[in-house]
Image: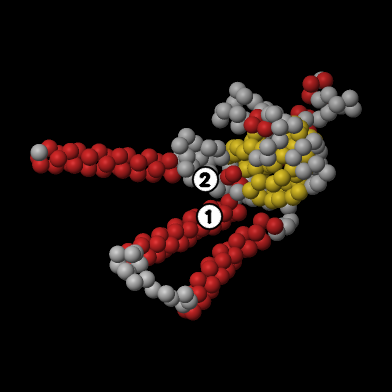
Amino acid sequence: MRTTQAQHRSSWGLAAGAFAALGTALVSTAALAAGIGQPEPWQMDRQVAVTENARDIHTFEQGMHWLSFGISAFVLGLIVYCIIKFNAKANPVPSKTTHNTMIEIAWTIVPVLILVAVAIPSFRLLRTQLSDPKADVIIKVIGHAWYWSYEYPAVENGGGFTFDANIDEEKQPKLLGTDNDMVVPVNKIVKIQVTAADVLHSWAMPSFGFKIDAIPGRLNQFWFKAEREGTYHGQCSELCGARHAYMPITVQVVSDEAYAAWLAEGKTKFARLDDGSKFAEAK
């Protein structure tokens, strides 16, 4: 009987160990599966940051997780200590203490110090986000039900056109591709001015570390500087109606030369006649 029980315990121990190892492997794999510009299957971490603002957000978030874990572990320890130290069996005659000046001072001052420690990097991050550096590129983004429009002002290399970006369900990743992508140059400060033509929308790009609401009648502004070339995907993150889930955002970050060529090409590709039809289609 004892041998059987020992074998059962051994089997359960091996199974538990294997399960734990499998769980650790899955978590490690998922944590490393953070996509560059798009989500990945079983992803647990955020997408790879390609702007300084996104990296600062990730660092701040991880710090908050560790701080929360430490506070939770400390409170749990206090609860366990009180259960063991002050249960009815260990204290047949309960204490009648009602106040402890040092403890009351500590549990007032320590939370204040924690909040101050959190506020300092938080305010620093907000200051960076809300700063207004001189822009190298300015793009106006307009949310519609349910697609995006992008306006590029006329500049020396081209520009001066507007185009719509609708979902292209044939592209990959699924439901994140558009027929016309927003294009920006790498390592340049891009300022976007965001509004909406009908209902509330929100222009969100996880790899850039921000989202900004698109509100009818109001012009919101934000900036970013992408440090890595590539294609990055986002979505409208404001519940805006029946096709909210089919309103993706695709941004291509390219070299200065490729951006200049795209601006010159877009002057013809996205030009429109007075009746609203595209010039490229009318030729």
At 48% from the left and 45% from the top, the residue drawn is: 45
- The C terminus sits in image quarter: top right
- When the figure is inspected, residue 4 is found, relative to residue 103, above or below; the finding is above
Say whether marks 2 and 1 touch (CB < 8 Å): yes
The residue most toward the bottom is 101
Which secondary structure lies at badge 2?
Answer: loop
- Count every numbered label the image shows and give the total: 2
The residue most toward the right is 274
Q: Is residue 246 left or right of residue 278?
A: left
Disc on the earlier residue, 2 or 1: 2
The residue tagged 2 is 46
Residue 212 in the image: state x and y as whole percent: 69, 46
Residue 122 in the image: state x and y as whole percent: 60, 61
- The N terminus sits in image quarter: top left
Q: Quadrant of residue 258?
A: top right
Residue 237 numbered tag: none
Q: Quadrant of residue 203?
A: top right
At 57% from the left and 48% from the top, the residue drawn is: 50
- Whether residue 135 is visible to the viewer of this picture, yes or no, is yes
Graded by Cα atoms within 10 Å as few (under 14), some (14 to 19) or many (20 or more), the crowding at tag 1 reads few
Q: Is residue 47 left or right of residue 127?
A: left
- When the figure is inspected, residue 187 is found, relative to residue 75, above or below; the finding is above
Residue 89 in the image: state x and y as whole percent: 30, 64
Graded by Cα atoms within 10 Å as few (under 14), some (14 to 19) or many (20 or more), the crowding at tag 2 reads many
Q: Amino acid at mark 2?
A: Arg
Residue 120 in the image: state x and y as whole percent: 59, 66
Q: Amino acid at mark 1?
A: Glu
Color theme of the render: secondary structure
At 18% from the left and 42% from the top, the residue drawn is: 9
At 62% from the left and 43% from the top, the residue drawn is: 205
- When the figure is inspected, residue 136 is found, relative to residue 267, above or below; the finding is below
Residue 61 numbered tag: 1
